[in-house]
Amino acid sequence: MNPTFYTVQAKDAPAEMADVRNLLATYDLELDDQIEAFVVCRREGRLVACAGLDHATIKCVAVAQDVRGESLSLKLGTEVVNLAAAKGRFHLFLYSAPRNMPFFRGWGFYPLVEVPQQVVLMENSPTAIETYCDRLREQRRPGNAIGGIVLNANPFTLGHRYLVEQAARACDWLHVFVVKEDASLFSYEDRFALVAAGVKDIDNVVLHPGSDYIISRATFPAYFLKDQAIVDRSWTAIDLLLFREYIAPALGITHRFVGTEPFDAVTRAYNADMQRWLHGVASAAPSITVVEIERLSIDGAPISASRVRSLWTQHELASIKALVPATTWQFLANRDPPVTGSPEHRSLEPTSREVEHS
Amino acid sequence: MNVIKEAIAGTLESSDLLVKVAPGRDATREIVIRSAVMQQFGKQIRRIVEETLDALSITTASITIEDKGALDCVIRARVQAAVLRASETKELDWRSLT
């Protein structure tokens, strides 16, 4: 009997998902609950293959041992690429165990970075990362100490400002990246504009738009699930190795700056991992010095964007004034906070649903 | 004809190819081909792709191809389909598709 392929929405099909979970478990894979949809294949009623899609990232791919070598997997690959295309996603990423890399080369994916023996991140273009690095190279600046900072800035606070100031002082040039993913309370556009306004007067700062290669849903899925405090060590490694092997060499970055993290477990783990993956482990790429800068405190409490968000949603505008630059304060004062949700609420869910419809 | 958005056509299966088209940069045509038969037919595949794009007057685009040993006519058809999708063409000059 011919195998049949179809798409399963992870949230709506518990029976299908139980079969998917079983198939994955057979090959020591865990079901990733960020996956929105699976392409599955059944033969004579039995689920024999599956491939999950989380936004633009393919994960949790399994093909039953006894149906391998029948070109069924190429059909599976085609189906999942088509599923992504139907959702308007063409630049795709894929997570795999390193040993299965040759298999996914046959799907048109190329390796980006690998955490040895654990996981490899691939993308469906052999040139996209180089094109991106070429664009970065145009922004290269001269000097011996070249710094890098990645900010979500949700929203930009005096704490961020202090970090950028300190880093800029310690470097010839400082490259600042703003996380592009629209999974935060404030939109990427707003966050970027507030960072731009907030660092405008610092002469040796180069501000960069974010990208799929820096703390994105593809490179660091756990970051956008902070509230659930899910931290998978190998995910932080992927993001950091991308920075070390592609972004830093393109810009000549020698130092990465980061604020100490008193509150957020995910960010704290990320900071600790930075030391390891940017500096500690052996790599063909030059090692990068990680500099942790003590957070700026006001009245004994460190400034954090989450505190600002919390005050804002509680309409405590007056208390925010001491925590953010005038430009950010102006922005917050001119608009209403969202009515529903806890102060820490992130707009992750609505964002993903909107994409569903496109 | 202009490529204004991303599009795909084809499959990853044997004797077929998957063509991905995206808007290009700086008035250049970037064509990347990976093929199961690159050693024997790489040059010929590239020539067919170039000719097909020329016929459709595509000057700026990024084309990524994963070929599984497709025949020339299949290559031409898949490239045309992907480009037409990527250009949202409403009225088609059928003569350009021969």
Image (spheres, rainbow, N blue to C red):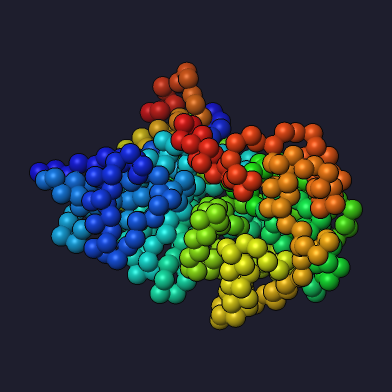
Q: Is residue A242 visible?
A: no
- Relative to A321, is A66 above or below? below
Residue drawn at the location 41% of the way across and 71% of the way down:
A118
Q: Is residue A290 left or right of residue B52?
A: right
- Relative to A317, is A97 above or below? below
- Camera-side residue: B54 or A80? A80
Instruction: Identify the image quadrant of the N terminus of chain A.
Output: top left
Q: Is residue A230 left or right of residue A100?
A: right
Give coordinates of residue A21: x percent, y percent: 28, 55
- Camera-side residue: A254 or A130? A254
- Camera-side residue: A120 or B88? A120
The image quarter in which residue A117 lies: bottom left
Residue drawn at the location 65% of the way across and 52% of the way down:
A179
Q: Is residue A347 visible?
A: yes
Give coordinates of residue A69: x percent, y percent: 20, 58
Residue extending farthest top? B91
- Camera-side residue: B53 or A282? A282
Give coordinates of residue A203: x percent, y percent: 88, 58
